[in-house]
């Protein structure tokens, strides 16, 4: 029994030793594997893409479009394209219709050690007047510098696509922190973040860029190309090498980069030409804003009671340009122009009064021509009817004359016949008289 117990203890001790060594070996392997993963993670760029909204948070809704669905299409296309580049790991904050708080999205980005967070959105404006794309970045330190540098690449590509640029901007809340929660929570975790508003859903200028899923996927591929350029990535699969791409150098600000909260410094207009024959008025506009530059303009011909829609500022690097507007007929023009800066604040110009424009519009001219054509057609119809009537009368007259001649001939024939018959009767009676006289003589 004693021998058996000793053998059993010995066996347990041996097995325990083997198990301990095995566990030690496994633990060592796990440590090595974790270290290898950590080293690989350090060598790999980590990008997190956040499709805006989700779940009950629909985002913008316009006609048949819902923002939460559109951003997910863009985000998946961006991820798929970025994963074709070497040395990059890509995550989505949501891959379905999940509802996440802004903080949860940033916590996820922090958990995977994100090098950059891209937040994808589409825009709407209160009065459905604005159009174009814009990027929002943090107003603080390196996050501003890195965000602005990437946004510069993004906006260049969006402009090449044909979308008007509304610029790269910061926005602060009432406490002086970044206004947009996704940027604020990312900045708190020292993760550079850019919020991309690809275009406006509620403006005809932008609709051609998003009205099909393939176009939304195109946005995703464009966003991926912007990230690849910014991070100097290469892709053998795509045959693309951005390793030598030069990003815009943006100094790290020492203070908060505040948004522009003032209107343009000035706006002045001068009428260069007035054409009273068609209502065209050529106006020269001069305006400037040293903080955020010029963005749109709108004009009025009734002294500011009503305005045209917004037009893009033709050359953002130039303060002066001219355009031609048309004043309706029988209006005394009082021209005024509103000039808008990068934050949609405007300054009104001086008012220029002009002589009345008493001309006829193409529609009125066309209407007059139509009336003249109608009158001419009616006149031609009357003339044609008159001519037909005269021809008929002439035909009737000729027939009547012929009938009259026939009647006269018949009358003459009847007279001659009657005369002939009378002469014949006279001659017959005369012959009988002679015969009686002869008979008397013979007696």
Image (tube, helix red, strand yellow):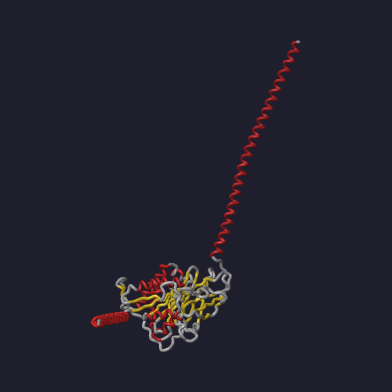
Taking the view exactly as shown, the residue that stands out farthest to the top is 443
| Residue 132 % position (x, y) | 45, 74
Query: Is residue 361 positioned above or below 187 on the image?
Result: above
| Along the viewing direction, whichever of 384 and 250 lies nearer the viewer | 250
Query: Is residue 279 positioned above or below 340 on the image?
Result: above
| Residue 10 % position (x, y) | 24, 82
Query: Which quadrant holds residue 113?
Result: bottom left
Looking at the image, residue 368 sits to the left or right of residue 113; the answer is right
Taking the view exactly as shown, the residue that stands out farthest to the bottom is 254
| Along the viewing direction, whichever of 226 and 374 lies nearer the viewer | 226
Whether residue 290 can be seen here: no
| Residue 265 % position (x, y) | 49, 84
Whether residue 2 can be seen here: yes
| Residue 78 % position (x, y) | 38, 73
Looking at the image, residue 142 sits to the left or right of residue 203; the answer is left
Query: Which quadrant holds residue 156?
Result: bottom left
| Along the viewing direction, whichever of 134 and 421 lies nearer the viewer | 134
Query: Is residue 213 positioned above or below 260 on the image?
Result: above
Count of numbered tags: 0
Taking the view exactly as shown, the residue that stands out farthest to the front is 1
| Along the viewing direction, whichever of 283 and 63 lies nearer the viewer | 63
The image quadrant where one finds the C terminus is top right
Looking at the image, residue 124 sits to the left or right of residue 142; the answer is right
The image quadrant where one finds the N terminus is bottom left
């Amino acid at each position: 029994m004693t021998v058996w117990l000793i053998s059993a203890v010995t066996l347990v001790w041996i097995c325990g030793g083997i198990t301990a060594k095995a566990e030690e070996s496994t633990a060592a392997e796990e440590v090595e594997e974790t270290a290898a993963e950590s080293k690989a993670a350090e060598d790999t760029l980590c990008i997190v893409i956040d499709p805006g909204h989700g779940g009950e948070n629909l985002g913008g809704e316009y006609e048949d479009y819902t923002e939460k669905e559109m951003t997910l299409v863009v985000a998946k296309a961006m991820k798929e394209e970025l994963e074709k580049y070497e040395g990059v790991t890509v995550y989505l904050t949501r891959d379905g219709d999940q509802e996440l708080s802004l903080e949860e999205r940033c916590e996820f980005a922090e958990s995977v050690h994100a090098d950059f967070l891209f937040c994808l959105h589409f825009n709407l404006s209160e009065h459905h007047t604005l159009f174009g794309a814009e990027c929002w970045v943090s107003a603080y330190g390196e996050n501003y510098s890195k965000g602005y540098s990437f946004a510069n690449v993004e906006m260049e590509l969006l402009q090449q696509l044909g979308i008007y640029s509304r610029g790269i901007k910061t926005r602060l809340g009432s406490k002086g922190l970044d206004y947009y929660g996704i940027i604020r929570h990312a900045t708190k975790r020292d993760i550079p973040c850019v919020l991309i508003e690809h275009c406006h859903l509620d403006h005809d200028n932008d609709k051609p860029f998003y009205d099909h899923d393939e176009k939304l996927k195109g946005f995703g591929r464009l966003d991926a190309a912007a990230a690849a350029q910014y991070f100097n990535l290469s892709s053998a699969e795509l045959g693309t090498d951005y390793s030598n791409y030069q990003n815009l150098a943006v100094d790290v600000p020492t203070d908060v980069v505040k948004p522009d909260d003032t209107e343009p410094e000035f706006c002045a207009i001068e009428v260069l030409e007035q054409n009273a024959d068609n209502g065209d008025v050529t106006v020269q506009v001069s305006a400037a804003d040293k903080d955020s530059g010029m963005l749109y303009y709108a004009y009025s011909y009734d002294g500011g009671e009503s305005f045209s829609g917004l037009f893009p500022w033709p050359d953002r690097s130039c303060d002066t340009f001219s355009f031609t507007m048309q004043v309706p007929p029988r209006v005394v023009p009082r021209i005024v122009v509103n000039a808008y800066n990068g934050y949609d604040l405007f300054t009104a110009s001086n008012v220029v009064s002009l002589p009345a424009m008493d001309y006829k519009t193409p529609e009125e001219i066309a209407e007059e021509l139509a009336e003249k054509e109608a009158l001419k057609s009616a006149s031609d119809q009357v003339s044609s009817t008159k001519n037909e009537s005269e021809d008929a009368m002439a035909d009737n007259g000729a027939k009547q004359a012929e009938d009259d001649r026939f009647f006269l001939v018949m009358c003459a024939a009847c007279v001659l016949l009657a005369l002939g018959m009378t002469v014949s009767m006279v001659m017959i009676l005369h012959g009988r008289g002679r015969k009686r006289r002869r008979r008397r003589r013979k007696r």
